[in-house]
Image (spheres, coloured by chain):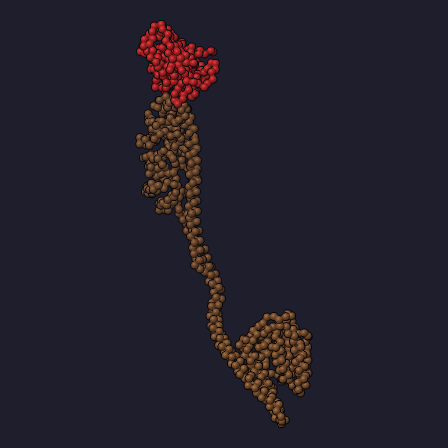
Amino acid sequence: MKFPSPVFLLLLAAWPVNAALADATIEGQVALPKTHAAPVMNKRYEIVSHGGILSTNPPLAVVYLSGDFPAPAAEAKITAQVGQKDMAFVPTLLPIQAGSRVEFPNYDNTYHNIFSYSPTKRFDLGRYRPDERPVPSVLFDQPGLVVLHCDIHEHMRGLILVLPTPYFVLTDPDGHYHLTGLPPGHYILKAWVDSNTTLEHPVDLRDGAVLRSDFP
Amino acid sequence: MLVVTVVTALGLFFAQRNVADNARRELEQSFQRELASFHSLQEIRHTALAERSRTLARRPRIHAALEDNALDLLYPSARDELLDVIGDPDQEASESEALAFNARFYRFLDNHGAVIPPPNTQGVGPLRPEEEARLGLRAVPDRAQTGYLVRSNHVSGDVIDEIIAMPIISSETGRPVAALVLGFKPIELSVRNIPAGILTGIWTQGHLSLPGVNTADRAALARKLSGALAAGDRRQTSLPAVIAGQPCLLFQQRLNPGSPFDPAYEVCIYPLTESQARQRRLLWQFSGAGGVLLMGAFVASHYLSQRLSSPVERIVVDSEQNRHMRRKAEAALELTHEELQRSARFSAAASHQLKTPVTVLRAGLEELLAQEPLSAPAREEISGLVHQTFRLTNLIEDLLLLSRMDAGRLQLQFSPIDLAPLIEGWLDDLGALPDSLALAVETDFPSPLLVEGEQRYTTLVLQNLLENARKYNRPGGRIRVSTQASADWIVLTIGNTGTTIPAADQPNVFQRFHRSALGENVPGHGLGLNLAMELTRLHRGELRLVSSVDDWTEFEVRFRASRRGSTGGGVSA
């Protein structure tokens, strides 16, 4: 079975909300930390920790618009997935809007036990098989970073970045991003680089305009 | 004697000390062996726990609890992981060996070294708050640390638990983010490894855990140990102690050197009863041996000193006597010398004084004899007087010579002298003498017959001896002159027939002016033999009377054989 790429999943998660509300656009590039890993096709991303600071490898950033946006009104539907495939979380880094429900399908032929002790969201899905139905899911109602572990496979690590905004996008490996459908107004544009680093710029969005903003 | 005693005493002292040292060393080695086995067991436990701790840090839930800031979930997460570490309390008494890896309690320290309190004591082992507080450290340790914790126990009194703090190293930062502190029942060595009567225990925080010792003794020991340790003597050392009235030796050594926990000491108590009994036995044995040795040495030294001192004493006595006699002899010699000198001076003076009138007398007589006319009887009378003057001159000459010899003034100039012509010349003169003895002469000597001497005096010796052989002969008698020669000596033997010298007179024949009874009719003045002997002595020779029996008197004179052809040195009288 072909597994959808992380970027596809991200767009799947963000697009329906964004497209309907706004039409301003921001694009630019986040200066990502240099990586020593050689560029290869079909990169697998992993969560690495340097001195307790978590990030993806190769580096990716999440760019989002910070402002006073309303939370989703109704009981959130399943808006995103973090699957377990080949003993790894896919995607390894998932930005979602607070109030979203994420399901954790098991694509491996073994048990997984996904849990999080992060203050943002503590949960423990217990051991479940690939054919577990319904697929276990968790509602993330508080913004913050959630570190995913598997109790069975100690090397597995995943991140869910719960954001208080519906306007966010994952950069490509070069740091380029393109955020469309934004509402006009004065906001703070933030770029999450790792668990310890979030860069920000104030931005002034006008209807139909395309703003260029690079980090830093 | 003193030396032997001192050596024996020293030997005893050193042997005794050596025995005591050996006993002590043996105990110390036993202590070290026990400690070594204890430490190796501890090492094994540390290794096992370190591995356990590493595994634990990797466990996702523990890891998540520590690194995702969820310390409240640490104990619930660890409970399952550490289920096998906390032993079943019901098994505690039964399986002592398994206890080495069965903890009584555990707690986590946060990254500042403070104890993370468990939400409840279920499954983590109960601890009083003050006991729990003692587990905390100033900082989270970066390697295994050992400590000892005094715990009050209502049943069996205070007990001491061994605590091990294992760091939990973050797999992300590589630094210790927390520590797991486990409490164990202290490792007890298997009973079969410990020799009988030896007590082992642990001292920490002024508290001594020593099973098998009553409370009073234990308290006294704890005080003593605390005092010794407070005095700064923290090196492994021994202390004398008394337990239940028995003397003991107490060894102590730090169990957790360098640990941030309170210092703890392994305490080992060895009863000295047996060792002291052995020492006493050895002391008796040594004393007995030493006593026997001392007695032997005493006897030997006494005997030796007797042996050594008797000649010395004798020498002392002898030398005292010798000194006394020597003094007397010296005094006598001095006196004699003075006498001799005086008499020699007198003889010389008298001789000189006499020679002149004798010469004048003879000259007068010869003048009378030359006058004409003289009657025949007068002439014969005067001739007799002249002859007497010659005798008088000879006597004076002999006296002069003797006095010179006595005064030590006569010196001989040695040269090789041939005796043969001297003897033959004299024998020729004998034949020409106008007497009626009709003596037969036998000679048996080679020619030449060389001796060391001075012609004038050697001749005098021969003349005197041959003259005596003639004078004291009987009519129809005989004279025999023979020689024996050796490498060093020429021995001349002169024998004659005639009246023998009475045995009583024989020792005195060489004395001056001695004339035996038989010589009354014989002309002479008793100086000839004395003079001959003195002169022979000056020749470094010897004159003696060989025998005088059965009509035969024999004298023997020894001269030194001459080996030279020329004049040699001299000798003085």
Residue at 45% in and 19% down:
A36
Name the quadrant containing residue A88: top left
Q: Which chain can be seen in red?
A: A
Q: Residue at x 47, y 16 (%)?
A: A39
The answer to whether residue B273 is above or below residue B495 is above
Q: Nearer the viewer, residue B28 or B258?
A: B258
As drawn, which residue projects farthest toward the front?
B372
Q: x%, y% of residue A53? A: 38, 20
Side of B522 where A215 appears, left or right: left
**Vertical order, A183 against B161 (above or below):** above
Q: Which chain is brown?
A: B
Rendered image quadrant of residue B160 = top left
| Residue B526: x %, y % from top left | 57, 83
- Residue B267 locus on image (x, y percent): 38, 40
Of residue A161 and residue B96, the one placed in the foreground of this image is A161
- At horizontal 36% and vertical 16% (from top left) the residue drawn is A199
Whether residue B95 is visible here, answered yes or no, is no
Q: Quadrant of the C terminus of chain A?
A: top left
Q: Is residue B245 left or right of residue B411?
A: left
Q: How many numbered discs, if any?
A: 0
Foreground: B543 or A67?
Answer: B543
Residue B31 visible: yes
Measured as percent of width and height from the top left, residue A75 is found at 34, 10
